[in-house]
Every structure is written in C-alpha cells, then in structure tokens.
Image: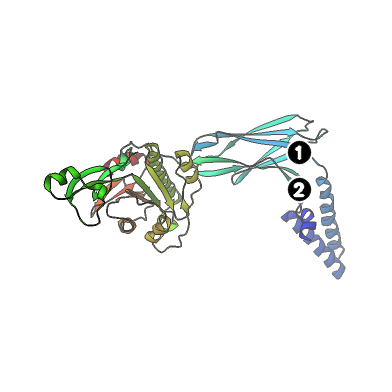
Amino acid sequence: MRRALGPVVGVVTALGWIVLGSGLASLLAGALLGWLEFTALGAVLLAALVVSGAFLVGRTAYRVRIELEPRRVVAGDRALGRLVVTGASGRRSSPSRLELPVGAGAAEFEIPALGPGDEHDELFAVPTERRAVIVAGPALSVRGDQLGMLRRTVAWGDAVELFVHPRTARLSPSAAGLTRDLEGATTPTITNDDITFHALRAYEPGDDRRTVHWRTSARTGQLMVRQFEETRRSQLALVLDVDRARCASDDEFELAVSIAASIGVQALRDGTSAALVTESGALRTATPTALLDDTCRLEQRDSPHATLREAARAATRRLAPPSLLVVVGGSGLTVADVRAVRSLFSIDTTTLGLRAALDEPSAVSVVDGLRVATVGSLADLPRLIRRLS
C-alpha cells in the first residue's frame, strides 16, 4: 500500500492535509448539526483541493548540470555556482520553476519554455562564511498550486559538494619540532640494532653476532659488540577535543579546528608523518587537501567518555607511537587534561597543549615541564608555536 499510494499521498503538503481534514470535519459537522454554513465551508475546502490537482498535470524533461567554481574555498572567500538547464524532451516544454537546495537554504529559479536542446543558465552565490561541506543539488522541478496545498517535485542532475576549508595560519617549517625528517632523527636512547654508531661494549650472551666488532675484539682479546643511537622517524599526533562541554562557543570551536588544521597542514608540507584524530575518528592525512576536506565535516558532540584521557585512548589506539603529541581543545582544556593524555604515551614523546580561548590573551605557560599555550587569535599562532619550540 505504501508503494502504491506513496506517489499520490506524497504530493499533499502539510497545508493540504489541514485543508482536507478541515473540509471533511466541516461536512461531518454540517451533517450532524444541520448547519448549512459548515456544509458550505467543507465543500469549498474540498473543491479548492480538487482544483489544485489541475496544477500538477504536465511533464517536463530536462538535463541539469550544476557547476561550482571553485570547488574548495577558505571560509569567507567567494564561491559562485551555475545552473545549466537543457531541454531534453522531443517538444517545447512549458515554463516551470526549479528549486536548487544549497546547504540549509534553497534558491528558486523561473525556467522559461525550452525547445529540444535549448539551454538556460542561472548564476547564484554560495554563502561561505563558516567552515562546512555545502551540498548543492539535485535541482527540483516543482509543479503545484499557488496556495501550496499540492506539490510535485522531480529531481534532476547530481548533487555537488563545495568544501569550505577552515582558516589556517602559515607556520615556519621548524615550528614545534615539525622539521623535515625523511630519514629519521637520532635520539639519546641506546639500542643494539640501528644505523648511527654510539660505542662498544663487552659481549653478553644473547647478543647478535652480526654486531660483533671483530677488529677491536682481536686487539683486546675480548668479544666487543657495537651499540647504536636509536633512530626514529618523526611522527606527529594531533588530538582534537570535540567535546561540546569544553568549548565555550561555536566560534571557539572553529578556532580550535583552525589551530589543528594549521599544524597538520604544515607538518604534511614538511614531509612529517602526521595523524589528526578526534572522538569521531581519524582524518585523512595523505595530502594537505585531503586533511582540510575532512576538517570541513568536523562537528562538536556530546562525548560518551567521562574524561579527555579516555577519549584520547580510544582515538589513538591504532596510532604508531608519536615523537610529538599536540592536544588541541577549547577554553575548557586544562593542564591536567593535557597531562592525562600525555600519560598514554612514552616519556620520550614531547607533548604540547593548545587552548583556543577567544576572550583570553595569548600566552605560553610551563607547568612541571609541560608546555601549554592559550591562543586568543589565529594570527597569534605562529608566534606561540615559535615560543613553544
């Protein structure tokens, strides 16, 4: 019954159902009470609904193409769209109305009569004040009465996505340890198997014979093995707190996203392996564009975890051990939260905390060796990162 009646019932709008219900109720009241006025009112309402059905008659065929230029913009930049409608029927179509959903709004266009192959295009502007993924389309041809009781729509064309990237700050290549490190960097940790030679020591049972330094062993009369300085590839882990409870406002959350995106993009440009994770999952970090595209979809949420440490544990469970950990959050992010997240990793991991707080002055504080910066404006981020590094 749903499949059979769906196309028929679906054309009735909320106003149409009100008119239908009022008309039937008026006829019933007129019959029970014997009031001619109720009967007349019911007849007029139902007649109006029947007459509205005549506006649904007719069929048009279009080929619709939606173009957005450019497909990726920074929040606040201008983006334009173009709707191209081509007549696809074998005869001239009648004038019609097209609605184009654009994000949360919709643009309405009057399409003139089009012959076979005739084109008509319309230009429209796309609002890009805030970071988002704005979906334009598919276009809807609308038939219905002027009162809005009945409405029949047909979708044309495919939806097109516009990525509104967050604003980012350009950081120096060496900021916060984000150095170009394609072959690894040596650390003070001593290991028995690596590249950079450190020293010799006496052989112990279980040592790999390939590390024996035979020339020194022959000279001293005792087996000596080589030790090495451990070499690690730089690995940046960005943990972005999206818990609504720790952000004072939407603008503060936008600043936190911009901070995380700025650091992540700079790391990828410098060839550093980076991962940006939230409670919602890990973002793509293959290229800076992929990272910025995924940040467009980030939203605040009510965290199911009691603490940020629990949320970070779940988000970073599959990450490689990082050499640098950066925790980014709103003004509700505390030093204790950053310290708790740091406890999830080894003592060799350098940890930084960045608080997005629009109403506070930008500053850097060091508490028990833990560096935490308060970012009051995105323009202050490069200077604060230089101080942290």
**From where the camera sits, is residue 354 visible?**
no
Q: What secondary structure is marked by label 2?
A: strand
Q: Residue 357 appears at what percent x and percent y?
A: 36, 49
The residue that mark 2 highlights is 152
Q: Nearer the viewer, residue 103 or 249?
A: 103
Q: Which residue is found at the position 19% from the left and 44% from the top?
A: 214
Locate residue 313, reporting x and y percent. 39, 59
Q: Label 1: which residue?
A: 96
Asked whether the viewer can see residue 117, the reply is yes
How crowded is the residue under tag 1: few (<14 C-alpha within 10 Å), some, or many (20+)?
some
Question: Looking at numbered disc 1 in the image, what kind of residue is underneath it?
Answer: Ser
Percent x, y for residue 150? 77, 50
* 293 horizontally vs 340: left or right: right
User: Which residue lies at the image location 85% right of the left edge and 62% below the top edge?
Assistant: 37
From the top left corner, tell me how far across and down residue 68 is, in percent. 59, 35
Q: Which corner quadrant of the image does residue 197 belong to? A: top left
Q: Quadrant of residue 305?
A: bottom left
Which numbered disc covers residue 349? none
Name the amino acid, label 2.
Answer: Arg
Q: Nearer the viewer, residue 172 or 343?
A: 343
Q: Residues within 10 Å of mark 2 (few under 14, many from 20)?
A: some
In the image, 280 versus 15, the foreground residue is 280
Report the residue that reaches farthest toward the bottom: 32
The residue most toward the top is: 118
Q: What is the spatial separation of the Cα atoms under label 1 and label 2, in whole angstroms?
A: 12 Å
Q: Which secondary structure lies at badge 1?
A: strand
Residue 57, quarter of picture = top right
